[in-house]
């Protein structure tokens, strides 16, 4: 099997969505390891905490 065929099949299996905000269209794709110990909810909570810490840090430095 050619490498391009493997990549094409992986792209077809990939989960994701497209979101248009204003004049910009975002094509979002993701994969999730079944062997991971964290749930998707845990990952989202970590992301929110990280972003809120960055926001708080930037407010403190201004």
Image: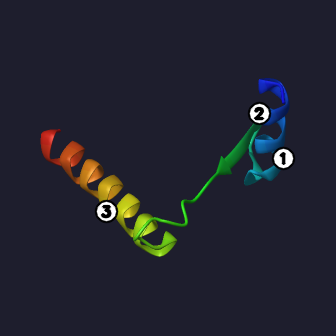
Label 2 neighbourhood size at 10 Å, few (<14), some (14-19), many (20+)? few
Q: Residue at coordinates 74% horizontally, 50% vertically from top-left?
A: 14
Q: Secondary structure at mark 2?
A: helix
Is tag 1's residue or tag 3's residue first in the polypeptide sequence?
Answer: 1
Q: Position of residue 32 (x, y in %)?
A: 57, 59
Figure check: 46 above or below 24? below
Figure check: 43 above or below 28? below
From the image, tell me which residue sits under label 1.
Answer: 12
From the image, tell me which residue sits under label 2.
Answer: 7
Label 1 neighbourhood size at 10 Å, few (<14), some (14-19), many (20+)? few
Display coloring: rainbow
The Cα–Cα distance between marks 1 and 2, rounded to whole angstroms, is: 9 Å
Quadrant of the snapshot with the C terminus: top left
Q: Nearer the viewer, mark 1 or mark 2?
A: 2
Is 26 situated left or right of 52 in this image? right
Given residues 60 and 38, the one toward you in this image is 38
Q: Secondary structure at mark 3?
A: helix
State if disc 2 and disc 1 touch (CB < 8 Å).
no
Given residues 47 and 52, the one toward you in this image is 47
From the image, tell me which residue sits under label 3.
Answer: 49
Is 29 situated left or right of 8 in this image? left
């Amino acid at each position: 099997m050619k490498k391009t065929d493997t990549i094409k099949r992986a792209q077809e299996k990939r989960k994701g969505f497209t979101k248009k905000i204003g004049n910009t269209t975002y094509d979002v794709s993701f994969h999730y390891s079944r062997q991971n110990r964290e749930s998707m909810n845990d990952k989202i909570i970590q992301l929110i905490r990280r972003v809120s810490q960055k926001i708080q840090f930037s407010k403190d430095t201004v």
